[in-house]
Image: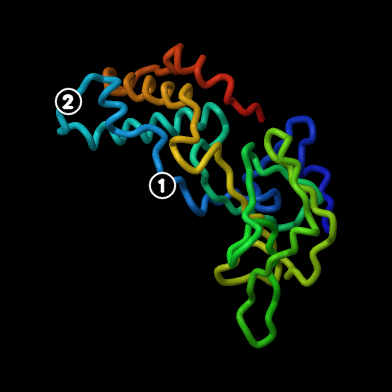
């Protein structure tokens, strides 16, 4: 196992310069398919009865949700990620709070390593969850690797469609459905989307004061 002292900033619980390959590349593999706020809910907020602007309103909802998630540094509806590594550290951050892991089935969450198959296609094999553990009380979540994964290919031997010798798969989000999301977050998204609706030109924009107050308790400080 490569213990890279500069890979992990224990003071801020985040990577130092994660844009470099050796530090871990975060890949969104499954985005949320459910919106926190529906078009009907935003129309009620705006007192709109007609349907001719529904597509525009849906765009505002999506943009407002992204703004709110970026402000809070977390996903509201569950999404799935892969965190890729050129070299595997003994401890690393998953960037987000609210992380969860499905440890059953054919596509389990957790650590995978690229293994060379003689005469066959190189493949990623699951590294048993008994060899790592997560500290979900941290904000964001921290993963500790207890045992050195064996048989992983060297970075120099990779070619074709593989990205790196290791990846860690995980899910993050407050909940799986809109009903799991606190009303304060929903109302903040409606306020931000309403601001977009009433002020359609590009301008120096900040959160409406009420929405920032509503989101503040859910902000993840990296």
Question: Residue sitting at 45 percent across and 35 percent down?
Answer: 179
How far across and down, in percent of the image, does residue 117 sit?
68, 81
Evaluate whether residue 15 shows in this view. Answer: no
First-in-chain label (1 vs 2): 1
Figure colour scheme:
rainbow
Question: Residue sitting at 31 percent across and 28 percent down?
Answer: 41
- Mark 1 crowd level (few <14, some 14–19, many ≥20, 10 Å Cα): few
Q: Nearer the viewer, residue 146 or 18?
A: 146
The extreme top residue here reads 209
Element type where label 1 sits in the image: loop
Whole-Å distance between the Cαs marked 1 and 2?
26 Å
Element type where label 2 sits in the image: loop
How far across and down, in percent of the image, does residue 89 sit?
78, 51
Question: Residue sitting at 58 percent across and 63 percent down?
Answer: 107
Q: Nearer the viewer, residue 185 or 22?
A: 185
1 is higher (above) or lower (below) than 92: below
Image quarter in which the C terminus is found: top right
* Image position of 59 (left or right of 110): left
Task: Name the residue beneath numbered marker 2.
Answer: 49
Image quarter in which the N terminus is found: bottom right
Question: Residue sitting at 61 percent across and 80 percent down?
Answer: 121
Residue 33 bears which disc, if any? 1
């Amino acid at each position: 196992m490569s213990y890279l002292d500069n890979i992990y900033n224990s003071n801020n619980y985040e990577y130092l310069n994660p844009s470099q390959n050796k530090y871990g590349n975060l890949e969104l593999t499954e985005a949320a398919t459910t919106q926190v706020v529906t078009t009907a809910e935003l129309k009620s907020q705006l007192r709109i009865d007609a349907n001719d602007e529904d597509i525009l309103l849906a765009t505002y909802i999506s943009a407002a949700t992204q703004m709110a998630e970026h402000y809070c540094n977390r996903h509201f509806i569950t999404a799935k990620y892969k965190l890729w590594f050129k070299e595997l550290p003994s401890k690393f951050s998953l960037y987000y709070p609210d992380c969860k892991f499905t440890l059953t089935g054919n596509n389990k969450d957790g650590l995978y390593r690229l293994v060379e198959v003689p005469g066959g296609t190189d493949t990623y094999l699951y590294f048993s969850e008994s060899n790592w553990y997560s500290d979900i009380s941290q904000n964001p979540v921290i993963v500790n690797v207890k045992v050195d994964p064996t048989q992983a290919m060297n970075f120099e031997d990779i070619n074709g469609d593989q990205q790196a010798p290791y990846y860690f798969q995980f899910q993050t989000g407050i909940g799986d459905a809109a009903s799991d999301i606190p009303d304060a977050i929903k109302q903040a998204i409606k306020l931000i989307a309403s601001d977009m609706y009433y002020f359609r030109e590009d301008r120096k924009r900040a959160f409406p004061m009420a929405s920032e107050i509503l989101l503040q308790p859910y902000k993840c400080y990296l």
